[in-house]
Image: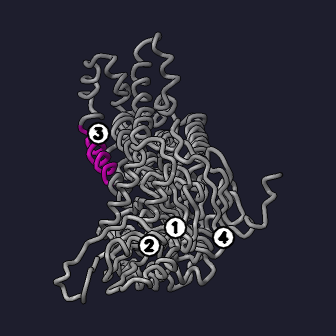
Amino acid sequence: MSSPMPLLSKSMTDSWRSTLGWAAGLCGAILLYLPLYPSIGGGTQMQQMINALPAEMTKALNYEQIATGPGYVQATVFGLYGYLLMTIATVAWGAAAVAGDEEAGQLELTLAHGVTRAQVVFERALGIALRILVLSILVFVLVMALNGPSQLQIDAGKLAGTMALFAGLALLSGTTALLVGALTGRKAYALGAGAGIAVLGYLFNALGKQSNSTEWLLNLSPYHWAYGNSPLLNGVEISAAWGLPAISACLVLAAVVALRNRDVGN
Amino acid sequence: MSTEVTSIESDLAVVDVRGLRKSFGRREVLHGIDFSVPAGSVFGVIGPNGAGKTTTMRCLLDIIRPSGGSIRVLGRDPRTAGPALRRRIGYLPGELFLEGRVTGRRMLEHYAAISGPVRPGRIEELAERLDLDLGRHARKLSKGNKQKLGLIQAFMHEPELLVLDEPTSGLDPLVQQEFLAMVREAQAAGTTVFLSSHMLSEIQQAADEVAILRDGNIVTVSTVDALRESAVRTVRFTAAESPSDVHAALSMVPGIRDVSFQEISPAQPLGPGFAVEVSAKLEGAGVGSLVRALARLDLVELVIEEADLEESVLTLYEAVPVETTIINTPARRSIRKVRSHV
């Protein structure tokens, strides 16, 4: 009862079911894709097929290095299915944290108790971060477990670094949804903003890689900040690993300011 | 620092509201209201839906922020006093939305964790009084049972001030009586209670003072006794007199109106001569002069009904200068509708 962070522990106990669901989804994606690598990704057949594809498509799908173990995991898990699942999960959590709670009419009663608005935003943001951490650790453990059997030849250190980027991207989408929810009180806007960051990041990365004239788009793509250097192959750029959480922290601070300065519930 | 200077009167007030204005966009819903709730009293605010009751209460809890005016709650400004002030308040929102996926007990434990300390056994004690099963999930509870959960979370930490927005909504009459008992006990223990309703009957039984709010203005603040004094009573009597004699006698009574006569045929066994059945309305404190006037008549039967406060409130609604009849009509209609439920 005397939890030091009552809203955080509430947010964790309320969300364990949904966290479990997303964990199952991530497990499914990983268990489906990684064991296939030795038969399709590792063979010369796969490389031939990739070579036959239009170069633009290969770039857009991040398939340039798909014939290597790290490239395959990067393109399938971190770059696509894992990214998709994590984005949906965190955007939903971020939108629910303030806007969803407010639209459901429950934020009013919480705020009428002995908590500050800053506390509500911080503890719920922390709850989202913890859940992202749990899911990221799960992905790390699963990929490491399949590393040998699937002949992926992934370096544990580089995987850990990539996990940080994977988590950072998810956190960015989640905190964007949180901020827009805190600003507007509308769940739909929050979902749109969080998903928008993720989708635009992906699109800008795909388009930016197409030609020199569109290259500038890469600078606007969080997806490219994180994965542009193929971290699972080449190691992580520290600036990206710290940059994403730092931006998320700023978004959370902005959410606190936004929520503190408006009426709730109308 | 002139705002820190408070009169002796407002020092004793647990809630002190001066010139409170609130606009949502360009629509102003509170037009500068003043009232103060004395410590230890039960203060009711009544008015039709949309009058501004909920807006006023949300301002007290810092859920929404005033556009103008000043608010003091337990001597502090809710805008700056923070969680420490809200821990001293128990709040029941007008529209209660509870999350459905946890049991009532878990939900109350959470609210206990973010409000003032709750004495062990207190939650069970309140649940037993209100006859609520805490082991059920909130989504499976009826509206009335959800309202009980809302009441328990407001009462459980024994706050200094209770702010209850439409507290009896959805409760059956037996539980309403239990609720009134809880309010009286809280008051006896020194709690100040600020409650709203569009039903006068519950304010009438619980409140010492009543503010009547309409379209964002306070029409009047009055004690329930004063309201009762100004209230309208229905008078019915049968007298073995001629209508003109009865009329002459009643014409001396101040506040009598709507007099109607019905002559009873002499064939009925009322003795010799005329008999009339009379019904009338008596407004104000004229019971004494009515009785004196009636004493001169040969009365067969007399009934003076208890004052109907709803009717007197209706009079107050109507007494206000009305900008347009369109505004006035919904107010009256909602009151009438409530009466038909009671």
Residue situated in front as seen by the camera: B166 or B332: B332
- Residue at image coords 30%, 66%: B340
Chain where mark 3 sits:
A
Q: Amino acid at mark 3?
A: Tyr
Q: For mark 1, what is the residue?
A: B195
Looking at the picture, how far across and down is residue B27, in whole percent?
51, 39
Residue situated in front as seen by the camera: B293 or B190: B293
**Do the residues at discs 3 and 1 belong to one chain?**
no
Residues in magenta, as a range: A24-39
CA separation in Å, label 2 and label 4: 19 Å
Q: Is disc 2 placed on a helix, strand or loop?
A: helix
Looking at the picture, how far across and down is residue B163, in whole percent?
54, 66
The answer to whether residue B111 shows anywhere in this view is: no
Q: For mark 4, what is the residue?
A: B38
- Residue B110 part of the magenta-drawn span: no
Which callout, 3 or 2, points to the residue nearer the camera? 2
